[in-house]
Image (spheres, helix red, strand yellow):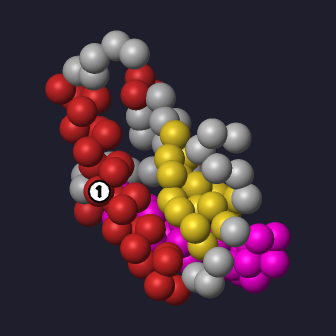
Amino acid sequence: MKKLSKVQEKQQTLVLDVADKLEAQAREEIPGMLQCWFDMEFHLFPSSLLLCFQFESEQALEAAKPDLLKWQKRLSAAMVKKGVILKDMRKHLVFTMKGPED
């Protein structure tokens, strides 16, 4: 893997900070939420950012789905506080059963 540029390091740090905070909140508020992980392509940031909340079971996932929009808004607000605007907040956070390696 090639070394990240200073700008890419800043982007990664910013996203890690937001993801860590949202993960801590979600673990307290959403039963069955295992972890938060993200994927992004630096050259397409922020449009390529995808944050995923991974759940332990299908039942936990289905129970959490009504709150998806609330969490998408929280992500958008957290990114705005960091100076990053997500044009369509619904594209950037999903609830899933898949892990980062899947």
**Placement of 73 over or under 51, stated as above or below:** below
Q: How many marks?
A: 1
Rendering coords of residue 80 (x, y %): 32, 59
> Majority secondary structure of the magenta segment?
helix
* Crowd rating for badge 1 (residues with CA inside 10 Å; few <14, some 14–19, many 20+): some
Q: Is residue 50 above or below residue 76?
A: above
Q: Residue at x 36, y 62 (%)?
A: 20
Q: Quadrant of residue 52?
A: bottom right
Is the N terminus in the top left, top right, bottom left or bottom right quadrant? top left
Residue corresponding to mark 1: 17
Percent of width and height locating residue 31: 62, 84
50 sits to left or right of 17: right
Q: Which residues are magenta?
A: 57-79
Q: As rendered, which of 73 and 25 lies closer to the eye?
A: 25
Is 44 in front, or is 22? 22
Q: Is residue 70 visible?
A: yes
Please say whether residue 62 is visible from this viewpoint: no
Side of 86 where 8 appears, left or right: left
* In the image: residue 27, left or right of residue 10: right
Left or right of 47, for residue 79? left
Residue 100, above or below 51: above
Q: Helix, strand, or loop for circle 1? A: helix
Q: Residue at x 29, y 39 (%)?
A: 11
The three-letter amino acid code for the residue at tag 1 is: Asp
Q: Position of residue 95 (x, y in %)?
A: 67, 63
Q: Residue furthest top?
A: 2
**Please, which residue is most extreme toward the left here?**
6
Q: Quadrant of the C terminus?
A: top right
Q: Position of residue 44 (x, y in %)?
A: 46, 28
